[in-house]
């Protein structure tokens, strides 16, 4: 009897395993799997900050006749400190923000640290390899100087409520995210623009829900 009973169990296991599948989802759709930091939060924060910065009246004061016809502000995209309890790659936020700003055609962005390393390697190759025409080889000392630095912080407040008779055996978790971004004039250290974005996420798990 034990051997006969084991066969249906194995068959059921194989059936459930065969039901497993993988598919592509729309990356712009709202993500609601849990309250942890996700793609929707990344997209929401980045887009709001980009829209606000592009419309900031404080940047108009950087117009200068010496800049010629191109009066766009030259920005250096700094870091975003992660002050949450989660492991969040805040560089992704800055990358999406940078992409939005550059694609707008309204702000010029100079290379970050990673970009500077790539540039340095290429200049050294052109100057010292002997493979590049000296008349066309690029040199250090001609990079565009940034006028402003953009940097910020991401913080969160978490509240949890465990299972109890009061909530019928369920549990809950709320997470509040606050994203603050600043734009500072390099020469004067003046704060030209500051914006904050916030999201509150709530997760409710019933008595029979997963831990």
Image: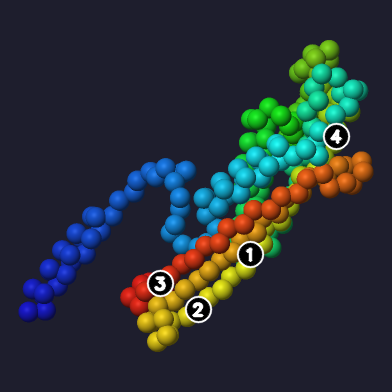
User: Decide: marks 4, 1 in contact (CB < 8 A)?
Assistant: no
Q: Position of residue 60 (x, y in %)?
A: 81, 33
Residue 56 visible in the shown view: yes
Image quarter where the C terminus lies is bottom left
Q: Position of residue 68 (x, y in %)?
A: 86, 19
Residue at 37% from the left image edge and 82% from the top image edge = 168
Disc 1 crowd, CA 10 A, few/some/many (<14, 14-19, 20+): some
**Alpha-carbon span between mark 4 and mark 1:** 34 Å
Mark 2 or 4, which is nearer the eye? 4
Position of residue 114 in the picture relative to residue 141 (left or right)? left
Residue that badge 3 annotates: 205
Mark 3 or mark 4: whose residue is earlier in sequence? 4
Q: Position of residue 78 (x, y in %)?
A: 76, 46
Secondary element type, mark 3: strand
**Who is closer to the viewer here, 62 or 130?**
62
Residue that badge 1 annotates: 156
Residue at 21% from the left image edge and 64% from the top image edge = 13
Residue 114 visible in the shown view: no
**Alpha-carbon span between mark 2 and mark 4:** 50 Å
Residue that badge 4 annotates: 61
The answer to whether residue 79 is above or below residue 85 is above
Mark 2 or mark 3: whose residue is earlier in sequence? 2
**Who is closer to the viewer here, 15 or 5?**
15
Residue at 66% from the left image edge and 48% from the top image edge = 91
Residue that badge 2 annotates: 161
């Amino acid at each position: 009897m034990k051997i006969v009973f084991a066969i249906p169990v194995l068959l059921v296991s194989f059936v459930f395993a065969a039901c497993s599948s993988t598919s592509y989802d729309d990356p712009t759709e709202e993500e609601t799997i849990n309250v942890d930091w996700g793609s929707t939060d990344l997209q929401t924060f980045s887009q709001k900050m980009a829209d606000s910065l592009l419309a900031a009246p404080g940047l108009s004061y950087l117009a200068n006749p010496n800049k010629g016809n191109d009066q766009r502000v030259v920005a250096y995209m700094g870091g975003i400190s992660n002050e949450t309890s989660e492991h969040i790659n805040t560089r992704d936020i800055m990358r999406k923000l940078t992409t939005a700003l550059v694609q707008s055609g309204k702000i010029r962005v100079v290379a970050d640290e990673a970009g500077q390393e790539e540039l340095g390697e290429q200049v050294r190759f052109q100057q010292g390899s002997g493979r590049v025409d000296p008349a066309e080889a690029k040199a250090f000392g001609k990079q565009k100087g940034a006028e402003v630095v953009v940097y910020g912080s991401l913080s969160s407040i978490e509240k949890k409520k465990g299972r109890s008779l009061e909530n019928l055996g369920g549990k809950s978790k709320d997470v509040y995210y606050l994203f603050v971004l600043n734009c500072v004039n390099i020469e004067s250290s003046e704060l030209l623009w500051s914006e904050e974005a916030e999201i509150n996420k709530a997760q409710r798990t019933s008595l029979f829900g997963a831990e």
